[in-house]
Amino acid sequence: METQRGLTEAMLAIQRKTQADTGYAHRAVHAKAHGYLKAKFEVLPDLPTSLAQGLFESPATYDTILRFSTTPGDVLDDNVSTPRGVALKVLGVSGARLPGSESDTTQNYVLGNSPSFQVATAAGFLKQLKILAATTGHAEPVKEALSVLSRTTNAGLEKVGLKSATLTTLAGQAITELLGDSFYSQAAILHGDYFAKVVLAPVATELVALSGKMCPAIPTRSASQSSVTLPRFQQYGS
């Protein structure tokens, strides 16, 4: 309970600070969106029993909305390059619901661009979150410099197979094409009688070609990740 209370207080502190700085209410994490897509979510027929569970029980096609974002709770300049996420909202879903959501018709997934969460425990995440809460709205030039250092160091480590998840978390996310990323549930999710992890990965030839590809311009205040990514959303989005 103490850890849960600490997480709540830290997230509220981030939200209060960003609201005071910007005049707007923001979510405590993943405040900055880099783009939205409308999509079709297709459940294929003849899935094996272990996969034909919950949302995937019967063949169907659903309207879906995706929101791409980066992790901080304050809206930072894109020079601060942090891990990425995508929220996937599947619309018009029927079936049994959890208590309190009986009237809902959506299935939501929150995914990150690494196969596992960088922190193993809630207590460990709280330690990290307290640091983020204390620095929210402060020292953005320092964060930009730290991000450049983290990216450069991580790129060197990756060449010898030693890429650091810690450096990635500390604003060391490589500035690659967003639509070439794969996104993971990071934890197993219960669907019907089975638990499984979920991954959202590019399969179209054009998107696979973007995987791991550096953006054509390093983000600056005049050429941000969002502005670099926008043409891709226009090209591949609906």
Image: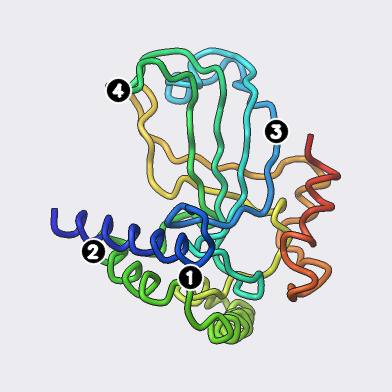
Residue 148, compared with residue 24, is above or below; it is below
Amino acid type assigned to the residue bearing label 2 in the image = Ala
Of 201 and 25, nearer the camera is 25
Q: Earlier in the sequence, mark 4 or mark 1?
A: 4
Residue 109, compared with residue 212, is above or below; it is above
Q: Residues within 10 Å of mark 4 (few under 14, many from 20)?
A: few
Residue of label 1? 169
Residue shown at the point (83%, 45%) measured from the top left = 234
Dot 3 lies on which element?
strand
Q: CA distance from mark 2 to mark 3?
A: 36 Å
Dot 1 lies on which element?
helix
Residue of label 2? 123
In the rendered view, does 25 fall on the left or right side of 5? right
What colour scheme was applied to this rendering of the protein?
A: rainbow
Residue of label 3? 38
- For the question of whether residue 212 can be seen, the reply is yes
For marks 2 and 3, give the one nearer the viewer.
3
Amino acid type assigned to the residue bearing label 1 in the image = Thr
Residue shown at the point (62%, 49%) measured from the top left = 68
Q: Quadrant of residue 34?
A: bottom right
Dot 4 lies on which element?
loop
Residue of label 4? 100
Q: Earlier in the sequence, mark 1 or mark 3?
A: 3
Q: CA distance from mark 1 to mark 3?
A: 28 Å
Q: Are marks 4 and 1 in contact (CB under 8 Å)?
A: no
- Figure quadrant of the C terminus: top right
Q: Position of residue 16 (x, y in %)?
A: 39, 61
Residue shown at the point (51%, 47%) measured from the top left = 111
Q: Are marks 2 and 3 in contact (CB under 8 Å)?
A: no
